[in-house]
Image (cartoon, helix red, strand yellow):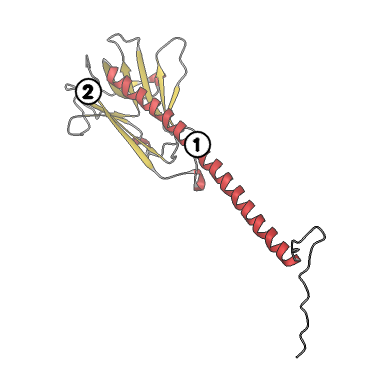
Amino acid sequence: MTLFPMNPPARTRGGDRAAFTLVELMISMGIFSMVTLGLISLHLFGQRHDQLVQSKLGASDQSRRAFDRLTEDIRAAKIWSIGNGVFSNFTAIANGSVQQGPAVRLQLTTGASNYIVYYFDTTERKLYRQHSGSPLPDRTLIASGLTNITANSMSFRAENYRGVTQTDLTHKGVVSVLLEFAEYQYPLTAVGPGLQYDYYKMEFKITPHVPDGP
């Protein structure tokens, strides 16, 4: 039997390293490209998630401060009344009628000149706050993106200790308000399909500390 010597492996001109074939080079480039695209996608996802979290935290902080103000104002009120209208034409609901309306007026002293009005704009679906002053002060946005089912549900209520809406103002009750949202971030950003996120609601029941007068 005659044995023929095998051909030695191909060598590169620069030394003893074996050269890549065209197929190996294409596979290597493909793997490198996929890894690079994966890293870039992961980096972009991380940036988007960070922006989302920071925005959500900032919006939550804004909402907390706004609702803290509502709570503090009601607790500090010496005289309060549920009514209709907005800041410039607020009308209190008379004693003997159901104490439910889109606005509440909070007098911080027994005098009539220092007061705050919170009211719903049912057209814009927003809640505003205005403090007395001259000239007419600018209103402050408290909540937006409200989706309360009907205009009547955008209202403040005076309730007794059982949660029943009052008609008799002889006994001081609790100021109750329900806010329903379709934005997970309040008050500026709407996200998700159709620019809306999961529905949620916030309900407040707040009692003035030292109420005075009718």
The quadrant of the picture occupied by the N terminus is bottom right
Q: Position of residue 171 (x, y in %)?
A: 17, 22
Residue 120: name its quadrant: top left
Left or right of 104? Residue 39 is right
Q: Position of residue 158 (x, y in %)?
A: 25, 28
Q: Nearer the viewer, mark 1 or mark 2?
A: 1
- Residue at image position (33%, 31%) is 155
Of pointers 1 and 2, the one earlier in the residue sequence: 2
Q: Nearer the viewer, residue 31 or 88?
A: 31
Q: Position of residue 125 (x, y in %)?
A: 43, 34
Up-down relation of residue 113 to residue 165 (above or below): above
Q: Is residue 149 visible?
A: no
Amino acid type, residue under disc 2 in the picture: Asn
Q: Nearer the viewer, residue 5 or 25?
A: 5
The residue identified by callout 1 is 189
Cα separation, mark 1 vs mark 2, equals 41 Å
Q: Indicate the secondary structure of the residue bearing disc 1.
A: loop
Check disc 2: other Cα within 10 Å, few if <14, some if 14-19, many if 20+: few
Amino acid type, residue under disc 1 in the picture: Thr
Check disc 1: other Cα within 10 Å, few if <14, some if 14-19, many if 20+: some
Q: Is residue 188 visible?
A: yes
The residue identified by callout 2 is 95
Left or right of 113? Residue 125 is right
Up-down relation of residue 99 to residue 56 (above or below): above
The quadrant of the picture occupied by the C terminus is top left
